[in-house]
Image (cartoon, rainbow, N blue to C red):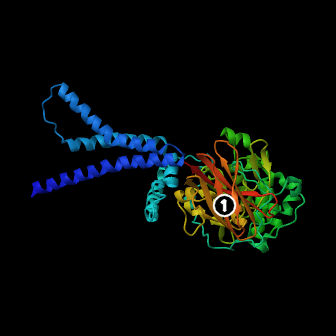
Amino acid sequence: MLRTAGRVWVLGLKALAFALMLAVPLLGVWAASSLAAYSDGPLEATIAAGVLLFPVLPLAWEGWSAWRRKRAKDAREPILTFGDRLVLRTLALNGAFLAVFLIGWPEAIFTALSTRGDWFLEHVPGAEPARRGVLTAADELAWMYEAAHDNPYARDDVDHDEIPAPNAGAGVAIALRDDADDGAPQTETTAQTETTAQTETTAQIETTAQTDVASSRTWPLDDKVHPLITTLPSETEASIDSVGAYLASHIADPFERAKAVHDYVATRVAYDVPSYRNHSFPPQDAQTVFTTRIAVCAGYAQLFEALARAAGLNALYVVGDARHAGDDTDGEGHAWNAIELEGGWYLVDATWDAGYVDDHDGFVRRYSTLYFLTPPETFGLNHFPERDEWQLREHPITRGEFHRQPNVSPRFVAAGLELVAPTRSQVEVDRALDATLTSTRGRFVSAEALPRDGGARVECDVQGERSVRIHCELPRAGRYDVWFFAGTQREGIYTGVGSVEVIRR
């Protein structure tokens, strides 16, 4: 009986080892080929490397060992069978390769797996359930990305474990405004860092009228700075507390007061482009930013938090990743805020409502309300917090789902646009991209493809008004960002509202 049980154990262990011998090389090929698919690398080379790792190199190793034994005239019978040795050699070689691969490039590997891990099923009829299974498996590897991912704006003094979970469903609902515009004219399509182009010029800001936040409860609000901020007495700006007390004493409605806090931060602080580009940041605490009037996203968010609390509101500092249209699918580290109003939590990004970064001119002030009390699903199009509860969604998405969703901005939603196809942030095509949008607010749409290698822009053919069909012929193999633009007039100036990355093989 014991001998039979021992044999069963041995057979079980051999079966497990054999399964691992097959699984480990397949994992290596999956990771390497997904990275090649995502970065437009040579798929054939990764598959060839997989064949080399199994069975070519294990068999070569076995042959070399046999040659050495023969040369040494070693007549002893090997302890392990040929099959056992082949399994162990395969596990050793492929395990080492996979470990080096994952340890060396964990963020890139996860991004590739979560974005293009199903590349080999893309054109297989009826493979949708299998594709979902593959991507679900990829999503389970998010821990690898997060363990290696360093957010430069994280704060050690923020302990969200001591903060009750936000009740996203409470409070007053923020609805899409019926007459929501898609913003001011803008044609710049260069990927912008941490800030985004919006509407008002500095001169116009000084003459804007009051927005009645208390009565509208809609998003996005008109891009008008609160008059209390434009007429704030200079002596009031002696400290954060004095500004907060002034706002609290003059504005009873908490939504309107939150708007005034947002407007103060968005219009008083300039974005610190040199520090961002050098990846070296001066102190970003609220007091320093209040004094210097210059900051990166961490400083904007910390000043918003401090000023909101000084004004009698409950605001928190949130960190995560964010991306602009034209960015890579995973984005980069960022900081923003959550604020509690009448029992409900809402999201605010004063940095991206302050202006944008131009490659030539540096920071350009351009005030907006696009990221003030933005609906969570819309805010989550390009913001992904480290802690799931600050998505404020009833059903939070995974990091992989964030990577996969098309890279459109809230401006896309405000313009009444919906991307029907493609539904992914990166797609592969043979010659051309065919996209479909719906436009429910009478916006006109245009599109163009920008090669990532710096070649000439390619104008896409756009047909239809309510159901919009876009056809982009890509002139050569490579990576492209296909940009979508929206405008209120057919012959007017269009604003960039989103993009999809396209690889032509």
Q: Nearer the viewer, residue 116 or 410?
A: 116
Question: Is residue 31 in view?
Answer: yes
Residue at x 64%, y 64% (from the top left corner): 436
Residue at x 83%, y 62% (from the top left corner): 224
Q: In the displayed structure, does residue 389 sit left or right of residue 289?
A: left
Q: Which of 129 and 293 is in front in this view?
A: 129
Q: Position of residue 495 (x, y in %)?
A: 76, 57
Q: Nearer the viewer, residue 470 or 190?
A: 470
Q: How crowded is mark 1: few (under 14 residues within 10 Å), some or many (20 or more)?
A: many
- According to the picture, the residue beneath numbered tag 1 turns out to be 470
Residue type, label 1:
Ile
Q: In the displayed structure, does residue 473 sit left or right of residue 26?
A: right
Q: Nearer the viewer, residue 243 or 48?
A: 48
Q: Position of residue 343 (x, y in %)?
A: 66, 71
User: Would you place residue 7 above or below residue 48 in this image?
Assistant: below
Q: Where is residue 82 in the image (x, y as percent from the top left)?
A: 20, 41
Task: Indicate the quadrant where residue 200 lies.
Answer: bottom right
